[in-house]
Amino acid sequence: MRFSNLAGIVALCEQESLTIAELMVLEQISESGEDEAAIRHQMREYYQVMKEAVHKGLTEDTTSRSGLTGKDAQRVRHYMSHNVPLLGEEASAALTYALAVSEVNASMGRIIATPTAGSCGIIPGVFVSSQKRFGWDDERLVDGLFAAGAIGYVIANNAFISGAEGGCQAEVGSAVAMAAGALTELRGGTPAQAMHAVGLALKNSLGLICDPVGGLVEIPCIVRNGFGAVSAMTAADMALAGVRSVIPSDEVVDVMLEVGQAMPEKHRETAKGGLAQTPTGRKIMKELQASRGRSGPSSPN
């Protein structure tokens, strides 16, 4: 890639009069040796999987194998249809779709890890709800995925996207930043504004620990996807309004790396701290272990 940080993306876009999506497509062509049609076709297929996961999460039984989670997206959707949601219909839809995809993941359904399975609902939640709201065609959302990919590439190579390495700030935080920056561009924002959205989103996620109850990507992961979708929209609106990330976005990424490295191991996907070690969290763990013991050893994946 010709860029190694977020400022580099902005500089190249401004020098060559490109959007972030256009720049990423060119970089993918250069890296892979494939033509644009093939690259866009692959991304189009990814977006179809995202839309299918939203639909499945809203219409099918998403009860997880543990029985701990499932159908919350459908509960929120039912609430929305019978009440005036405090967030408004648009943000509530993004929240609902994000929950839906995350619940599909927890129930062993097919998703796209964007950038991880634990944060898989945020980009689909934001993109699919925005597509319906603004009447965008799929190709526009494919552009959005390329823009999100460029942002994710920088974060992954300068910090991390894994909860085991840097806590949930690395998973949900990165997804929120990717969605925020991409949505800013989709709404007509400049590359500079998109990167301000990234900084604003990441700053709001710093320090978020990874504390999966029972060691499962369910509690609190699923609801964090819902909150994350709304946060991404908030950051995009701020950036489009002219709000700047006073701390440059690359420096925010550096801080995420610093915070993640300083985070105790028990707060990095081990289920040894945080919500996983509350009285209720420990009780759930014991019940899961007892259940597994009764059913015998699980089959290897």
Image (cartoon, rainbow, N blue to C red):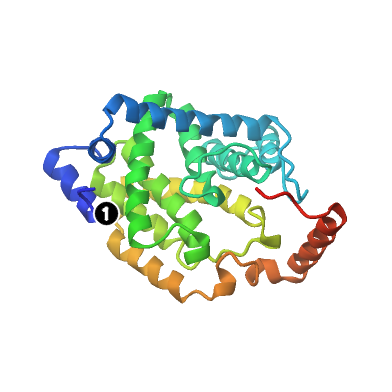
Q: Which residue is mark 1?
A: 6
Residue at the right extreme, as displayed: 294
Quadrant assignment, res 34: top left
Taking the spot 27% from the left edge, 48% from the top edge, the residue there is 193
Taking the spot 26% from the left edge, 56% from the top edge, the residue there is 5
Q: Residue 33 vs residue 215: left or right?
A: left
Three-letter code, disc 1 = Leu
The residue carrying pointer 1 sits among few (fewer than 14), some (14 to 19) or many (20 or more) residues within 10 Å by Cα, namely: many
Q: Nearer the viewer, residue 73 or 266?
A: 266
Residue 237 position (above or below residue 142) = below
Taking the spot 87% from the left edge, 56% from the top edge, the residue there is 294
Residue 180 position (above or below residue 293) = above
Q: How many marks?
A: 1
Q: Is residue 219 visible?
A: yes
Q: Residue 296 vs residue 3: left or right?
A: right
Q: Nearer the viewer, residue 147 or 86?
A: 147
Determine the secondary structure under disc 1.
helix
**Which percent across, then down, holds residue 203?**
40, 62
Residue at the left extreme, as displayed: 15
Quadrant assignment, res 135: top left
**Which percent across, then down, holds residue 98?**
56, 42
Q: Residue 152 vs residue 280: left or right?
A: left
**Which percent across, then down, holds residue 123?**
47, 42
Taking the spot 46% from the left edge, 60% from the top edge, the residue there is 170
Residue 265 position (above or below residue 216) = below
**Which percent across, then down, holds residue 54?**
58, 33
